[in-house]
Amino acid sequence: SDLQLEGALHAIRRHGAIANGARAGFFLGDGAGVGKGRQVSAVIFDSIARGRGRHLWFSVSPDLVVDARRDLTAIGCHVPVLDGCKSLDAAAQKAFGGDTRSRAVLFSTYATLVSAAGARAQNRLDQLVAWCGGAAFSGCLVFDEAHKAKNFDAKKEDASTKVSRAVKLLQSKLPLARVVYASATGVSEITNMAYAERLGLWGPGTPFADFKAFAATLEKRGVGALELLALELKSSGAYVSRGLAWTRCEFEGMHCPLGAAQRRDYDVMAAWWRALHRALDYALKRTNAKGGTARSRFWGAQLRFFKEVQTACKVPFVVSKAKDALAAGQSVVVGLQSTGEAGLRDVMAEAKKRAGDSAPGLVAAAKSAARKFVVDFFPVAEQVGDDDTGDAPDEATIRRLLATDKGGPPTDAQVRQYQAARYEALARRGLPFQDLVDLKAAILERVEGLPVPPSPLDDLIEQLGGPGAVAEMTGRACRVVRGHRGGYKYDARFDAADDGAANLKEREQFQKGKKHVAIISDAASTGVSLHAACGSGAAGRRRLHITLELAWSADKAIQQLGRSHRSNQESAPIYALLSTDLGGEARFASAVAKRLASLGALTKGDRRAASGQDLSGFDLDTKHGRTALQEVARACRDPRPGQVAPGVDVDADG
């Protein structure tokens, strides 16, 4: 389209500038579904036509090589697309000197970029640089889904992710490469911009010496400064960020309160965690443990537990809405983040089950995670400090330890008492306390009786017709499904030969209309098209996109919403944003809403633009929200009549 051609022309013009020995880069920040792949292909095609034959294209998944080939072919660019560095390894084995093709696009993933090259002396990054021809390389260097390189810590580079460091290093090794950053969510906050060093915002010749100074200046000035930054980049030709209109999309905020039974079950689970917290404090003191790791793991395990429980509580509501949509001739896309595979593997390993064996039923992954925390981090034996030599101190040392200014030196009886206690402690060192062993056993026994709902992913698939009717696009390898005879089976999602193609096959079946329900997780939330594409087998079925589980970050939320709203679609989707009446979920929604405002400011120059609607109502981090939090904390500390809601007892021990 003309709009896509405009983006390609901006990038080509930008690449003509060289400053301080490095070629200027271009940021293609168009929203999901606009057609960034076509624009990247056009930039590569232009370079090939001008005699630059070799190009690098990085993305997040090897499955997306199919889309890259499709986009290049669609604009008439019929060059070989090499599938990862393994193609280079194969070429090196077949012909001395490696790959000899003068024109090719090497498609690779960020995971490959940071991996080792087996027994080879060079790593993958050096192998790619060598294939390009070294520092003189002037072809295209495309970072598709560039947000994967966002976690770079300018203050402490060692704390940065391997991907972010590799992306920066690759740019430094190829200073004349024509860099294109492509992502709908490239910068959700200013500290995530470190990888985009070719935009010319910091360094020699700019007002900022380095990225650290640049980020510190803009962070002080809030969202307004981010909006001005986006406008500045666009006016300089370094950045475009167009988005599909949301005019035909429908947004429905669906409130699904917990039923009476779900509330009772939730209270039982909350009471168990409160009891575990008290028991853990007692055990840590009893065993003389420091407790830093155990306490941090406790809060992390509790957070993940209740996040999965609240997601599972929405399943009956989602199933009802999905069946209504199917009856109305629509197709359903359900978005979640986690699959519960780790908990499923633990349960099956404990039961000594392998793929293909029978299963007792659907697994509650949250229960498995709670049990694993107790087994791994609940102490029952006395802990020994790093400075403990294992020997009892001599009498002179004991007298020095027990001496006080007021009481003077200790008596002989006090010294003997201290020695006896010390010898007893040394004798017990490493031995479990029987009362703690019994307490741990009681806690584990009570875990088994918790009314934890089954994992939402498996539960959804079963209630919506099973694997034959539901297209699952996730990263997990195994699942529990109902067999032909009514029992459950621990089943592999794909054979070893099909590894990497399972999600492609599921997507194809959904797009052709052979399956009318698709469930996508975080692993399949980038670059996948699930819209009502014109000419596809399911073009006439409007999409109902249900957000079952809210993403942890704004960029993931936008990426997932973009799967069903794309260019060349026959109808725009209906978005159903689900929320329960649990306060914890409101806190998550608040954090994401705030990030969405920041993302919209950076990408569109408008804090409301990222999601197509104003989500400020979800943001609790406001003046009124902070005042409310202060009032709650004050009421809990010093409750007075009329300050506490009816039925709430702040003195209750749970």
Image: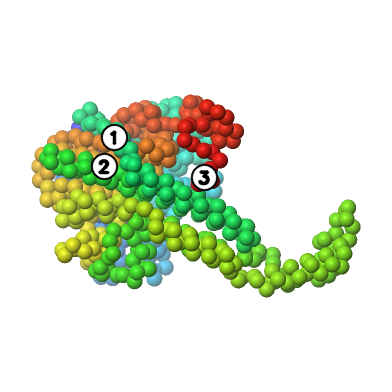
Answer above or below: position of 519 versus 131: above
Find numbered disc 2 in the image and state the secondary structure of the residue it sits on.
Answer: helix
Q: Amino acid at mark 2?
A: Phe
Residue indicated by mark 1: 254
Depth check: give the residue in front, 311 or 553: 311
Lateral position of residue 458 relative to residue 485, left or right: right
Residue at image x 15%, y 42%?
A: 326
Give the mark toward the camera: 3 or 1: 1
Find numbered disc 1 in the image and state the secondary structure of the residue it sits on.
Answer: strand
Lateral position of residue 441 relative to residue 188, left or right: right
Q: CA distance from mark 2 to mark 1?
A: 10 Å
Residue at image x 30%, y 51%?
A: 456
Q: Amino acid at mark 1?
A: Met
**In terms of sequence position, does the residue under pointer 2 or pointer 3 come before the other?**
3
Depth check: give the residue in front, 141 or 228: 228
Residue 61 rendering spot, x and y as whole percentages = 30, 53
Q: CA distance from mark 3 to mark 1?
A: 41 Å
Near mark 3 (Cα within 10 A), the count class, few <14, some 14-19 or many ≥20, is some
Quarter of the figure with the N terminus: top left
Near mark 2 (Cα within 10 A), the count class, few <14, some 14-19 or many ≥20, is some
Residue 361 rendering spot, x and y as whole percentages = 28, 61
Find numbered disc 3 in the image and state the secondary structure of the residue it sits on.
Answer: loop
Depth check: give the residue in front, 430 or 562: 430
Residue indicated by mark 3: 154
Give the mark toward the camera: 2 or 3: 2
Residue 532 rendering spot, x and y as whole percentages = 16, 40
Lateral position of residue 174 relative to residue 545, left or right: right
